[in-house]
Image: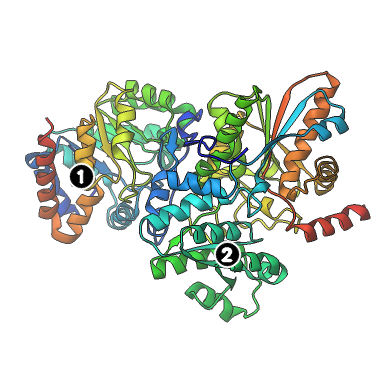
Amino acid sequence: MVAYMTLGYPNVNDFYEFVDNVEDFGVDILEIGIPPKYAKYDGPVIRKTYKIVSNNIRNYYEILHEVKERIKIPVVILTYLEEYVDKLGDFLLKLKESRVDGVLLPDLLIDYVDEYEKYVNLIKNEGIKTVLFTAPLMPDDLIIKASKLTDLFLYYGVRPTTGVVIPISIDSLINRIRTMVQSKLIVGFGLNSIEDIKKAMSVGADGIAVGTSLIEEVDKNGVNGALELIRKLRGVLDEYY
Amino acid sequence: MVNSFDIIPKYWYNIIPDLPKPLPPPRDPQDAEFSRIDLLRKILPKEVLRQEFTIERFVKIPDEVRDRYINIGRPTPLIRARRLEEYLKTPARIYFKYEGATPTGSHKINTAIPQAYFAANEGVSHVTTETGAGQWGTAVALAASMYDLESTIFMVRVSYEHKPMRRTIMELYGAKVHASPTDLTEFGRKILKENSRHPGSLGIAMSEAIEYALENNYRYLVGSVLDVVILHQSIIGMESINQLEAIGEEPDTIIGCVGGGSNFGGFTYPFIGTKKGKKYIAVGSSEVPKFSKGKYEYDFPDSAGLLPLVKMITLGKDFIPPPIYSGGLRYHGVAPTLSLLVKEKVIEWREYTEEEIYNSAKIFMKTQGIIPAPESAHAIKAAIDEALEAKKTDDKKVILVNVSGHGLLDLSNYESMKNRVMKK
């Protein structure tokens, strides 16, 4: 299971408490969002967290560094290439110094599809793992190529925007990609009902990524609420391993 | 030949999985106060929304929808334009698909029917939409009546006043038609407060239709731009494939006009997807020079900015078109899938002036007896040009053109066009 949390949300202390506990509650990989100026493919819930965090926190890398001190599971950064495209070297260096494991850029195969291999190489040359983000709207051959380049897992976002529940046939979307790719397949982006998760797992997903629903839990019931949700979802996933 | 279940295609065709590059997804604008994508969820029938985001190559047409397609006279005729060929003295064979042969006179009804069906199927009693010139509103009014739904149409005030016949048709089908801006919505009331004689715009009418649907828990039917509209319009192309096969013809050049891109996409995509045909030509208007002057970027499909941003060839949502004859071609953008295919050079484009298409329309009227919609006359002009080009090289190729609607309700447009052309 991949759990998402926006860096330093809802405040730095609560964020650390979340980080300290995720592994025990069953998370395999922690995904941390660095607020961009324009969260193109995020829904309103995550966009709101970006706004709060970017108003309150100055130094993101210090916190990332601290996160790596606290946990052993891999940490993957989620942010938009658009934000760093002109200063990518500098950004990658900072990530490397923070010792994060990987980076996921949801806009890489959409807005930079003509030169994505160049960026993938730049990231890998810094010793940082690249998690590629794919979506149903991508043509078959691009998904296959991406699955061969991706590290850790292939992230498959099944809805156009995180956290917005559009009625789609999750099983047919995953069936299509499962027959094409050998890599580990993590399904996310607006997958938040138990039924959705069961569907995804039963047709061959290797795991799920949750984000929006964790943030909603943090807002309602604090960090403990989010951790409890992780425990519950872990239980659902474990039925399929 | 009696229309029957056998001839109507069983599936719509979706080009998404066959595109050469990923289709950029719809987005919410930066600093959005509310999610436009989430808004779609609240206003569109569920199945319409599911189909908007489907990646299935073929989507089954419900039997109830196929039944209504028969009811409006599908399959529409595929006619060989022999008199036009003779007039041009071309060795090419010209076929046209005639979407003007439906009761509402254009292709719009092809998506109004499934959208109304999906709304009725989820227990909704009432649908809303906006209309400018009246084509789309008419299609929704008829489709709604077919499934015993009530319909409320927000018609741009200037059109409401200048096109009373369109309004009458919608009302005869049972729709409630309001001149937008109205006092039925908060948005309309705000506009009226600033200017009680506001002429209205498509953007305002759309905002009103969406707000009215949201307020009353009705469903909103969408007329253009979204991929699901092109999916439904693919009935035109799927049917044409069957009809051509029946007479043993293979098309070489396939032509359609482009307003938002739904009739063009619906007509050509099934051919592109099954690799039938060699050349596809999208035809726009020189007065609305989207293909030659538009940029490929994220923009709002509607002028009010209520729908999600989509990446398309666009003149900008605030583009003010000149008051040309072809209302349907005044739209500022080109549907995302079509934009991508034009950018990737799978599809060629042409743009013609009012004068050029007026003359082509006249040739078509004289030789085939049909008064084409001025929009469709653009496609006809391209077909004539292609046929004349074939004459030079004695090329016996097959040209297939979509006549998306008739022009019998556009006579005043033809009248004003004639006056302008004569003056030159």
| Front residue of this view, candidates B304 and B168 | B168
| Residue B225 in sight | no
Indicate whether B252 appears above or below A67: above
Q: Residue furthest right?
A: B423
Quarter-of-image position of residue B365: top right
Task: Specify the label residue B173 is tagged with.
Answer: 2
Amino acid identity at mark 1: Glu
The disc numbered 1 marks a residue on which chain?
A
Q: Is residue A121 left or right of residue B333?
A: left
> Which residue does the image show at 63% across and 61% down from the upper left?
B132
User: Residue A198: x, y in percent?
Assistant: 19, 39
Task: Specify the label residue B405 is tagged with.
Answer: none
User: Residue A143: x, y in percent?
Assistant: 38, 26
Display colour scheme: rainbow
| Front residue of this view, candidates A46 and A205 | A205
Q: Dot 2: what SS?
A: loop
Label 1 crowding class (10 Å Cα cut-off): few <14, some 14-19, many 20+? few
Q: How far is disc 2 from disc 1 in space, using C-alphas?
A: 42 Å
Quarter-of-image position of residue B155: bottom right
Residue that badge 1 annotates: A195
The lab-note entry on whether marks 2 and 1 share a chain reads no
Q: Is residue B396 left or right of residue A120?
A: right
Q: Residue furthest front?
A: B2
> Which residue does the image show at 50% across and 72% down from the upper left?
B187
User: Residue B343: x, y in percent?
Assistant: 60, 33
Indicate whether A180 appears above or below A10: above
> Which residue does the image show at 32% across and 47% down from the upper left?
A162
The disc numbered 2 marks a residue on which chain?
B
Q: Is residue A58 left or right of residue B2?
A: left
